[in-house]
Amino acid sequence: MAEEVTYPRYRWFLLLMAWALLCLTAYNNTMQNVRYDLREAPPIGLGLTTTEFYLCIVASALAPIVVNVLSGLLTDRIGAKRVILYGAIVTVFGAMLRVAATGFIDLFIYCIIMGVGLGTLSGNVPKLVGQWFPVRQVYLGIALFSTSLGIGPFLALSTGAMFPSYFVGFLVMGGLLAVMCVVWAIWAKDRPKEYLEFGKPIVGVSYKESLLTVIKSKAVWLVLLSFALVAAVVAAWVGGIPLFLVETKGVSKGVAGIVISLSVVGYTIGIVLWAWVAEKVGRMKPVYVVCMVLSGATGLLTFILAPGIGMWVIGIFPGLFMGAGPPLIMQMPLRLKGIGTRYAGAAVGLVTSFSAIMAFTMLPYMFTPLWNTLGAFYASTFLCVSLWAAGALFLMAPEVGRKYIMRMLKEAEQATPAS
């Protein structure tokens, strides 16, 4: 198509802008995890209890529960650029308003507002990748973009506590996010409306058509449930395990943050590594399932071996294997029969909405009650089993790896009469 020649290099610049926008959004969201001064009494902090501290960490998952589906439908209708921009602007307001918080309730509300951008970005960039990248590069585009979900939290966990106060940290990083919003507004582009996929436009899709197509897909629901469990464990691991290690294993606050940062480094590496491995193997299901099994097992081992040397040796692996989740799941709607780029906004929106529900509920309402009633070991085992269940659900989904895509393309070429 003509569009493939018009912007051959621009797609990488677009991906870089989206990556930076999500990276800064993730940083703003995750830096709260290590701002323990929020638990101090005023005027140093806000006097948050442990439960309130955790609720504020996961509050940003509340907005995406509703926003992701709506923004996905809107993206199928008007394109991704404007939807992402609107979400990012709302996120900036939420991030900056946190500096004015006087207690748990208003901070919790501002964190919910901040979650709007986290949902619109992660849910709609896959559609941009489907528009701008050829089929053979979709895995790479999504994998590179998804590294922002690792690098942003890693930088936040490792440097978020270095600001002299949570007030300064929120103000500085919120300002940087605002600058990136301006960059996106100026240079980001959607594909021209004339761009087609299998003879159909990828924008201008009615809300009813998008929603009905997606909710009728059994494969989407299997992927949705699998990713919801993975996303919830990621949120619990990054948001709750630092304090968990401090209070159950006697690990110092600084060391706990570094240990989980190792997992985030592994997560970032895993996002690219397992996307590449799955592409080379030609199948996604075995790679994903093995990674979820190993992620759960090594996560449990990290807790068991803490605070000894084993914690440091194993610490990178839970995240490394967990990193298979985002790039493989986010490719699925683009590759699933009957979904593709045309309905990718609604499909990914639905997937990420349910993942937001689980991300919000698992840490304060599943993990913490288990910790308080049955003990730390059972709470850790619960995270392990959740990842194993995610692998089992994905195993029931259709295989849409590279070999499947190549077969479909070959069949399409053979079905097209020679000109």
Image (cartoon, grey):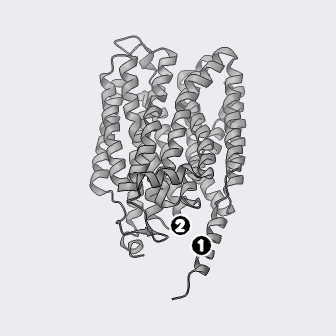
Q: Residue at x 39, y 38 (%)?
A: 116
Mark 1 in CB contact with mark 2 (< 8 angstroms):
yes
Secondary structure of the residue carrying numbered label 1: helix
Residue 323 drawn above or below residue 340: above
Residue 378 picture location, percent across and down = 71, 23
- Which one is in front in this view, the residue at disc 1 or the one at disc 2? 1
Indicate whether 255 appears above or below 8: above
Numbered tag placed on residue 409 in the rendering: 1
Q: Which mark is residue 135?
A: 2
Q: Earlier in the sequence, mark 1 or mark 2?
A: 2
Q: Is residue 51 above or below residue 360?
A: above
Give the crowd class for mark 2: few <14, some 14-19, many >=20 residues within 10 Å. Answer: some
Type of residue at label 2?
A: Val
x, y percent for residue 358: 56, 33
Between the C-alphas of marks 1 and 2, the distance is 10 Å
Q: Amino acid at mark 1?
A: Leu
Q: Position of residue 243 (x, y in %)?
A: 56, 22
